[in-house]
Image (cartoon, rainbow, N blue to C red):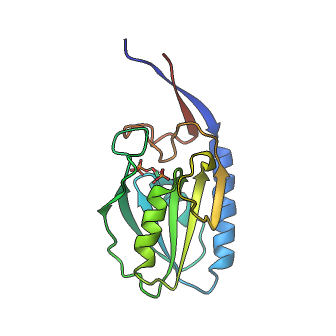
Amino acid sequence: MRPQSKLRVLIDREEISKTVARLAFEINRDYRGKEPLLIGLLKGSFVFMADLIRQLDLPMEIDFVAVSSYGSAKETSGKVKMVQGLRTRIRGRDVLVVEDIVDTGLSMSFLLAYLGKKKPASLKLCALTHKPSRCQIPVSIDYLGLTVPDEFIVGYGLDFNERFRHLPDICVLEREK
Ligand code: PRP
């Protein structure tokens, strides 16, 4: 028989909303007088990016890139590759990367190195969640939402096999035997 999946709410929509508001406050304060370029890492960041930018009171632009390390698996393959590169020139720009989760740190360390080579004026990271227990490559997060435990989470952009991204809460995906 196929194992059933069960969802348990870990971070509800109210807590997500308060967290996004706090991060937007910090970004508004720190980028006052600047015109940042926000770069979202697809696909997971798209919901967070959409909510975050609507609380920014700054002139700004957005772009998206995609890297891949998980494929359709729950565990990272350890090899990160660029799937969709930048369409915006970032040399001399204040770049803020927007990410849904920093887990092992492999995707983000790869992306930050890729962007850093293009000589932005500044390069910072805003991550909604961080799972420090799984860290393989430490990544410095300038704007951190919430630390999450070592459980497989879905919702608010995060998926398992491309499913569950639409959930408004962040949930733990529990597999029943
Ligand atoms: C997920 C997530 C992060 C990354 C974090 O993306 O959205 O980008 O993994 O994991 P890491 O810190 O271990 O590298 P995924 O590669 O599953 O693609 P997706 O964003 O399209 O879901």
Toward which corner of the image does residue 52 lie, by quadrant?
Answer: bottom right
Q: Residue at x 52, y 79 (%)?
A: 36
In this view, 73 is above or below 80: above
- In the rendered image, which quarter contains the N terminus? top left
- Describe residue 55's horizontal placement relative to residue 29 as left or right: left
Q: Residue 137: x and y, percent? A: 53, 58
Q: Depth check: give the residue in front, 97 or 112.
A: 112
Figure check: 96 above or below 137: below
Judge left or right: residue 176 versus residue 81.
Answer: right
User: In the rendering, at what x and y percent does residue 57 appear?
Assistant: 60, 74
Q: Report if residue 54 is visible in the image.
A: no
Q: Which of 130 and 45 is in front in this view?
A: 130
Q: Residue at the far top: name it.
A: 1
> Up-down: is 11 above or below 107?
above
Percent coordinates x, y for residue 147 in the rendering = 66, 49
What residue is rendered at 45% in x and 37% in y?
164
Along the line of sight, which residue is nearer the eye, 52 or 135? 135
> Is residue 130 at all visible to an observer of this figure?
yes
Percent coordinates x, y for residue 86 in the rendering: 34, 72
Is residue 64 placed above or below 78 in the rendered structure? below
Residue that appears at 43% across and 38% down: 74
How many numbered badges does the structure rendering display? 0
